Amino acid sequence: MSQSNVSESRIAANPRRWWALAATSTTVLVIGLDTTILNVALPDIAVSLHATGAQLQWFADSYLLALGALLLPAGVLGDRYGRKRSTVVGLVLFFLGSLWCALSTSAESLIAARTLLGVGAAVLIPLAMSSVVVLFEAEERTRAIATLGISTMVGLPLGPIVAGVLLQHFWWGSVFVVNLPVIALALVAVLLFLPETVGTRGRRLDLVGILLTSVGMLAATYGVIEGPERGWTDPLVLAGLVGGAAAFGAFVWWQRRDRGVEPVVDPALWRQPAFRWGALTAAVASLAFFGAMFVVPQYLRGVLGEDALGTGVRSVPMVLGLFVGLRLTMLLLPRFGARVLGVCGFVVGALGFLLGTRVGVDSGYGLTAAWTVLVGAGVGAALFCGQNGALAALPRERAAAGSALVQVLRQIGSVAGIAVLGALLSAAYRAGLPTGLPAELADTLGRNVATGMAVAAQSGSVSLEYAVRSAFVGGLTATMWVSSAICLLGAAMVARYLPDNRAVAAESGDAVDVSARDRG
């Protein structure tokens, strides 16, 4: 047995590996929480920092742009220079970014601090996933992946709940201060329990490939984020989308040439069906799930009249469904395989979205709880099957870079889901508003359902309030139909291309052999 294989076996047999997983799970929990916690605090931040509407948008966008641009490079650097060392750097950056956010006294300062948070998250996310590949053997890896997945998703509805409680008693900066003790605890746990692992360093770092992927993700993410707000024909939006596509095209051309450097994306890895289709399955599932996560809070607040805390609490059924879907899939995977369970998951998600088309202005919360549970369980199962298959195909030497690629595709799916389904929701909502209104009033009502309900309430017109709610429900119905179609397309893709768990295990061994031959 080679020295590297002995070392890997010792790492995977480390009895402290579950403590190390707990540390990384805590990290991704905070990242998930930070994804949604800002939205609740925006009104308070706008008043305190005298922020404009464009600055409010950039509080969120600066984080997403940094995250999207640096995910893949961070994974490559983590493999090369040490995953524990890189995780510590990411935690320190996230800690400093959270502290800077809390202490910001201007909108420009908060935008810069949110960018630093995005950099920290970009480092931490792929390294958290790579720890599963490095620390756990195949028989335990499924459980570890489920643990990380649940930790990520639980933070999303917890954000509004935590923010609502904090803002009732403290200033807006407290929503960032809450990160500090958790990150400090995770940092101590990583230093104590996470072993240092390093990938191969046989060839030079591909700086050109890293630059092209960063520019491509930055430009494409900007275009997708700004498209619904500026319009898809806006010059800046088109420049972002076209520039991103051009950068990705140049990256593919560059990667196909053997220039004596370590490739950012290992072609041998991408050629494996288990990794390729697993990653794409996870991306499609993320598109459907995050599109729903974007729509549901607006329905709860705008149509049902819930406050921020109530919205967070009533978003919990989707995460509970996700937990059930992950748990059942983990138990059934050895018997039925990833293909069967992935198809079933997407079909259940499609049925959940179809049930969501039955939601009306007066249908109440019960129906929403039912369809969100189904969506969470179904899409969560499909997401787990895809991500588990992709990570199982990774050799330990490329764990962080491979995990980063999976997360990049999931990030693209998430942002696309929010942008595309959000644009559809907005268009259908505006089309459903009453005609014949004064131009200024129609423009104000059409901004979003929250603004529309506020204006309608100020007017004292009950019929106008009902019309705004009905228009939003019409937009919600349109997004439910499209989301259901996305799930059915995902089911067809999984049925045709995704290998089952036995194929994944076999190809995982092939991946290690390929990597070993490359080292030789």
Image (cartoon, rainbow, N blue to C red):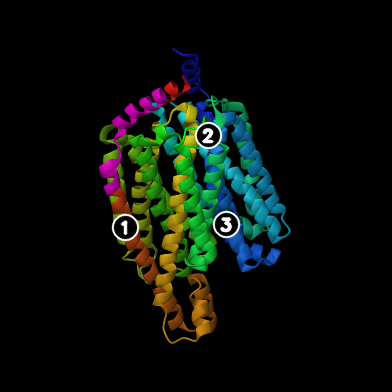
How much space separates mark 1 and mark 3, taking CA atoms? 28 Å
Amino acid at pointer 1: Ser
Local crowd size for mark 1, using a 10 Å CA cut-off: few (<14), some (14–19), many (≥20): many
> Considering the image in quadrants, where does the N terminus appear?
top left
* Element type where label 3 sits in the image: helix
Q: Is residue 13 visible?
A: no
Q: Which residues are magenta?
A: 492-514
Q: How many marks?
A: 3
- Which residue is located at x 62 percent, y 29 percent? 191
Question: How far from the left and from the top, in percent, is residue 310?
Answer: 50, 61
Position of 227 with respect to 482 (left or right) is: right
The rendered magenta stretch, by its main secondary structure, is classed as: helix
Q: Is residue 465 visible?
A: yes
Does the magenta portion include 352? no
How much space separates mark 2 and mark 3, taking CA atoms? 29 Å
Question: How far from the left and from the top, in percent, is residue 495?
Answer: 26, 44
Sooner in the amino-acid sequence: mark 2 or mark 3: 2
Q: Which mark is residue 484?
A: 1
- Which residue is located at x 63 percent, y 63 percent? 55
Q: Which mark is residue 22?
A: 2
Q: Which mark is residue 61?
A: 3
Amino acid at pointer 3: Asp
